[in-house]
Image (cartoon, rainbow, N blue to C red):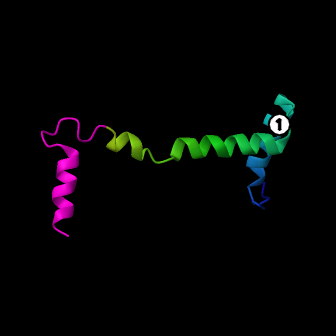
Amino acid sequence: MSRILVDIPDSQLAELTQIVDSQQRPRAVVIREAIAAYIAQHRPEHDAEVFGLWKKKKVDGLAYQKELRSEW
């Protein structure tokens, strides 16, 4: 696990302190969970965009690939 130094405004630190105190959990745990949630929310959904892309195509994908590669 790596350590980082982050500057945050005093107002955010005060709110974080309230959350930590009310949940009686370590600040580091709360911050790690917040970062994990942010990453999950902003992770690119490339798989969802391309999954089933050829489903409605009338062309066999393997035959199409071989045809393209034959041009090399």
Q: Position of residue 26 (x, y in %)?
A: 86, 39
Q: Tell me if 21 is positioned left or right of 12 in this view.
A: right
Mark 1, residue position: 20
Residue, x 12% and y 39% (percent of image)? 58
| 57 falls in the magenta region | yes
Q: Quadrant of residue 53?
A: top left
| Highlighted magenta segment, given as a residue range | 52-72
Residue, x 54% and y 41% (percent of image)? 41
Residue 23, compared with residue 6, is above or below; it is above
Q: Position of residue 37 (x, y in %)?
A: 62, 40
Residue 32 seen in this snapshot: yes
Q: Residue furthest bottom?
A: 72
Q: Position of residue 46 (x, y in %)?
A: 40, 47
Residue, x 79% and y 41% (percent of image)? 29
**Residue type highlighted by circle 1:** Val
Q: Secondary structure at mark 1?
A: helix
